[in-house]
Image (spheres, rainbow, N blue to C red):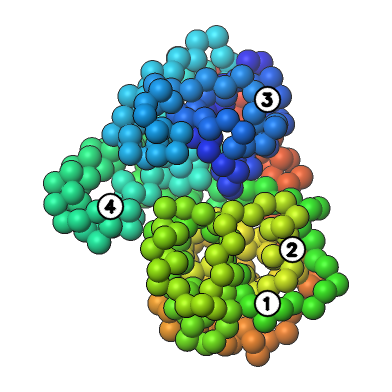
Amino acid sequence: MRVALVHDWLTGMRGGEKVLEALCEIHPGADLYTLVHRRGSVSPLIEGRRIETSLIQRLPGAARHYRRYLPLFPLAIERFTFEGYDLVISSSHCAAKAAIAPPGVPHVCYCHSPMRYAWDQFDAYFGPARVGWIASRLVYGPVLRRLARWDAASAARVTRFVANSRHVAGRIRRYYDRDAAVVYPPVDTDFFHPSTATPEAHVLVVSALVPYKRIELAIEACAQVGVPLRIAGHGPDRARLERGAPASTTFLGPLSGGALREEYRRARAVLLPGEEDFGIVPVEAQACGTPVVALARGGALETVADGETGVLFDRPAADALAGAIARLSRLTFDRERLRCHAQRFSRPRHLAALRAVLDETTAAPEGTRW
């Protein structure tokens, strides 16, 4: 079977790229199509594919500032052709799901989220506070409304949707009027495991530094309760966040591998201040025996058990998060229980569930849609 994999962009190893890694393992001979590829930014398993990039790759600064070319994403993804393939699999949170498979060729979309900024998070990315009133209303507003219409219409190109959580399955139903199977993303619970060391006094955030992650809530909440905060990650919001952070906040930059695992183990708790579609970080933390303080929305409702593996708070506000941190300090957590909970999201379970969905889809009669 000749398989084409389609991924939005290859610029770093985040949750979506972990799913792409699994797809590369399931279909080791698959070709890979992507809008932009920054060489060396993803794992050897992904880099080893034959990778074809879009017209955006050739535009100035695209490897790092690809989002500035957002209006061109529909044209770029639709220029890919997949003649000769027996299966198209897209890994999508933006444009990849709009790939056009040849007639009779199934297209399975693993959807990390419908396009956030085109639907319910426009203000977080392109609101007046971010880009100014004129640009928000007269430039980005019309562009994103057009993208939302295109995003909804192009959902018809997908034979079967697979969502990374029940929360995202609900968004797929709301915006695309389609059902979706749920296959949770893979977490390397063999690599992420507890140590015997005693956790330190600080708490930890592991996140891309972008608006919807709400990192400023974590900074303000920790200042309120007098708890040191360490932040691992990078992104366009870093300079803004650093300007408003007290001396008790440490920015670590991007971490991976053993350095990230050690941060999870050392922290008293890991904070998730924003709404996540799934959120791999809370599961990695629990696999290391570290409890999580998370906003009680989105994927956290599926990964964090309140009072057992962490604490949930009900409002995206600094005082609510501060209260949850204070509550966590009064609770006792068992590392092995936390780790056992995280095993529900292990990589072997992900691979088995994803293979089952792909096998069922390709075995179905031609023309079957879910």
- N-terminal of the pair, mark 2 or mark 4, is 4
Secondary structure beneath dot 3 equals: loop
Contact (Cβ within 8 Å) of mark 4 with mark 3 = no
Q: Position of residue 328 (x, y in %)?
A: 62, 83
Residue 31, visible in the rendered structure = yes
Residue at x 42%, y 60% (from the top left corner): 239
Pick the front one: 245 or 288? 245
Q: Position of residue 122 (x, y in %)?
A: 29, 53
Q: Is residue 186 left or right of residue 247?
A: right
Q: Quadrant of the N terminus?
A: top right
Contact (Cβ within 8 Å) of mark 1 with mark 4 = no
- N-terminal of the pair, mark 3 or mark 1, is 3
Amino acid type assigned to the residue bearing label 3 in the image: Gly
Amino acid type assigned to the residue bearing label 1 in the image: Arg
Disc marking residue 126: 4
Q: Is residue 163 left or right of residue 67?
A: right
Residue at x 18%, y 49% (from the top left corner): 135
Secondary structure beneath dot 4 equals: helix
User: What is the C-alpha distance between the residues marked 3 and 1?
Assistant: 38 Å
User: Mark 3 highlights which residue?
Assistant: 48
Residue at x 59%, y 62% (from the top left corner): 252
Answer above or below: position of 342 versus 327: above
Disc marking residue 262: 2
Q: Position of residue 307 (x, y in %)?
A: 64, 80
Pick the front one: 3 or 240? 240
Answer above or below: position of 138 versus 325: above
Amino acid type assigned to the residue bearing label 2 in the image: Glu
User: Mark 1 highlights which residue?
Assistant: 268
Disc marking residue 13: none
